[in-house]
Image (spheres, rainbow, N blue to C red):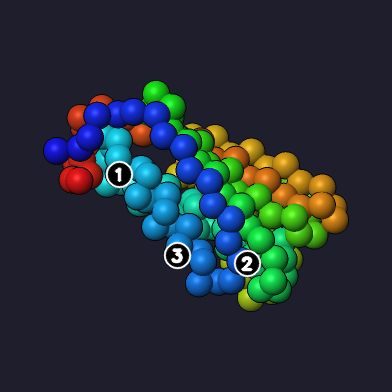
Amino acid sequence: MAMKNRDNYIKLEFSSLPENVALARVLIASLVVQVDTTITDLEEVKVAVSEAVSNAIIHGYQNEPNNIVNIEAKIVAGELEIVVEDSGIGIEDVEKAMTPTFSTHPDRMGLGFVFMKSFMDNVEVLSEIGKGTKVVLQKKLVNDGSCARVAT
């Protein structure tokens, strides 16, 4: 039986290491399962967080491991908001970066923002060249009873 839906908040900063993508995903999943939500929503949030953190590490910091990625998440009245922030190189053209298949790296598919936008209710990207990028992900989590619930 899931716990009662209540407000919660977390904040974490971690090194820009690829293995910390999984850390961020597990952290957010641990927060999300505290509310009455669906397995589908949980999986979608995990993918969106993975993409946002991967972008910070791969694109924002160009895979340099000695930088910091910040992640904050809160759930208020069943609404999840996640902020992933880096102080990396920034995005020159956010609209172009959010275009399907666009990537600044030839070995990347350019689908990170596509996944974020399809799995979250709202995605906002704020970026400034040389100062970094902030990705805000929002999703309503409260289960309407039509899908399988996450057991806690």
**For mark 1, does the 10 Å Cα neighbourhood hold few (<14), some (14 to 19), or many (20 or more) residues?**
many
Mark earlier in primary sequence (1, 3): 3
Task: Say which quadrant the N terminus sits in.
Answer: top left
Relative side of 91 to 72, left or right: right
Residue labelled with disc 1: 33
Relative side of 22 to 56, left or right: left
**For mark 3, does the 10 Å Cα neighbourhood hold few (<14), some (14 to 19), or many (20 or more) residues?**
some
Which mark identifies residue 22?
Answer: 3
**Tag 2, which secondary structure?**
loop
**For mark 2, does the 10 Å Cα neighbourhood hold few (<14), some (14 to 19), or many (20 or more) residues?**
many
| Position in image of residue 149 (x %, y %) | 20, 40
| Position in image of residue 137 (x %, y %) | 54, 40
Residue labelled with disc 2: 16
Instruction: Please name the residue shown 20% across and 37% down the image.
Output: 2
Position of residue 57 relative to residue 73, above or below, is below
- Identified by mark 3, the residue type is Ala
Which residue reaches farthest top? 77
Mark earlier in primary sequence (2, 3): 2
Is any part of residue 141 visible from this angle? Answer: yes
Instruction: Please name the residue shown 66% across and 73% down the image.
Output: 65
Mark earlier in primary sequence (1, 2): 2
Q: Quadrant of residue 15?
A: bottom right
Relative side of 139 to 108, left or right: left
